[in-house]
Image (cartoon, coloured by chain):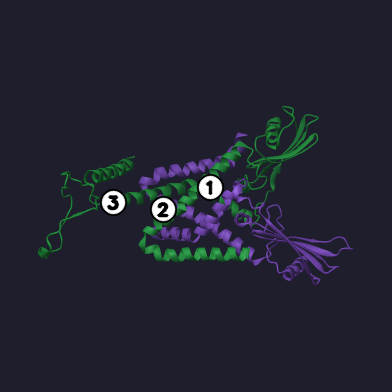
Amino acid sequence: MGAIFRYWTVAEKAIDFVRSTGEIPTGRRMISPPLHQRHAPTPIVDAAPYPDGENHIACPGLFLELQMNHRKWMRDLHLYAGLFISPFLLIFAISTILINHTWRPSDAEATDPKQTVQLATAMPEGLDMLEKADWVRGAVGIQGEVSNLFHDGNTIDTQIFRPGERFAVWVDLEAGTATVTRSTTTFWDRLATLHTTPGPHLAGFRGNWIFTKIWRGLVDASVALLLFSTASGIYLWLLIRVQRKTGLVVLGSGALSFVLLVAALTA
Amino acid sequence: MDAWNRKLHNYVGLFLLTFIWLFSLSGILLNHSTWAFAQSWPSRVESSTEIDIQIPPDGTELSRARHLMYQAEISGEIYRIAPHTDEANPGIDVQVLKPGRNTEIKANFETRKAVVKQIQTNAWGVVQWLHTFTGVRMNNPEMERDWVVTRLWSLSIDAVCLGMIFLVASSLYMCYPQVRKRNLGWGFLGGGTVTCLFFIYGLSWIY
């Protein structure tokens, strides 16, 4: 909070000075002698009184100070944004390696015996797919994302999942019962599930559970923060003069390899 | 060590920049596949041609499929090989994929002709395909990559993931010595971690 206050105080002083004098503070104030008297280096006077008599000690180097604050803010935001999204990045990175090599595929760790449950409510008529998904969750008492739903006459065949658990549900609407088979999955499958949820398939249907919607929003936010981190990272890198040349070479190499790969894939 | 860590953090991030942008953008598109502007299927271009072929020499299904692809001047990752089971209609069907293009070759060895059907999507489709194009399927572990470009792309995906893990680790290493920022940093890291753990374990614990 102190940093925020100081930043605004400096900025307000700059605005006040410009309004009152019409001059733009350029940092240090130079006193230049007439040309025929210039034998020595021009003295630079800091904190000299300005025409309005006020001592603008904050103004000399004002924009340098603003610039330093800006860099500090960008560095801090880059750090904190990166720290917040770090767990998300780890989830996606690790799960991508698993998916890329089909390591730990969706094998069930353990499958419970089938259970028959009484439906809590009868299914109303005229429901659309999303409403049927909501009804199934309530009727069988299982919370999770409904991955697909097949309604054929008096039966509904569906699957409900949440990270770590999968339920195969077969509903007999006439008998008012449902057969449920629960499977628990591995930790790695939890990561892969989170990576692929809600996913591109059945676009209008997936995301039918509130926590799936929340996860989708969190992932979007993580991506936005990641993009901000990349932009702020570029800005911070450009400030480091000694790393600019090497950084440009590295950046160019990465971009070139990307372009060549994509060209080979799509040619 | 600190200087090296910072340098590597910068340079790894710069090298992976374009890859990160691609997977970020494509990930958002896949997460919101109802967005109209990114719909690639309605604007697909389908084409069909018939070509004369020579019967591929005897060998494995893969080698025969590759021979047909060579004759049809098609490259890509073989997704499906289906020899005809009807003896009266000997031949082989091959489905070949590459980002943005789905090609099906239906070869008839009796007539020595093959029908080549192609479906080409727009740039949005290519971007989304690049995100998921690995050459393997989680529900089909026996499937193998048979195109060298797919292997290179798969390796680059691995490299991006390992790079991201390094970037996270190096950022934690850089943050820890900064005493003034440590508390707030732990707060942000803790917030993200608790959120993720809730979704990994918390949901199944609650319900």
The circle on residue A63 is: 3
- A179 versus A200 height, above or below: above
Q: Amino acid at mark 3?
A: Phe
Query: In the structure shown, which secondary structural element does the residue marked by tag 1 occupy?
Result: helix
Q: Which chain is purple?
A: B
Label 1: chain letter: A
The answer to whether marks 1 and 2 mark residues whose Cβ atoms lie closer than 8 Å is no
Q: Secondary structure at mark 2?
A: helix
Q: Left or right? Give the position of B85 relative to A249.
A: right
In 3D space, how far apart are the residues under numbered discs 1 and 3 (Cα atoms)? 38 Å
Residue at the outermost front position: A22
**Quadrant showing the C terminus of chain A:** bottom right
**1 and 2 marks on the same chain:** no
Can residue A167 be seen here?
no
Number of residue marks: 3
Report the front residue among A82 and A114.
Answer: A82
Q: Is residue A245 left or right of residue B159?
A: left
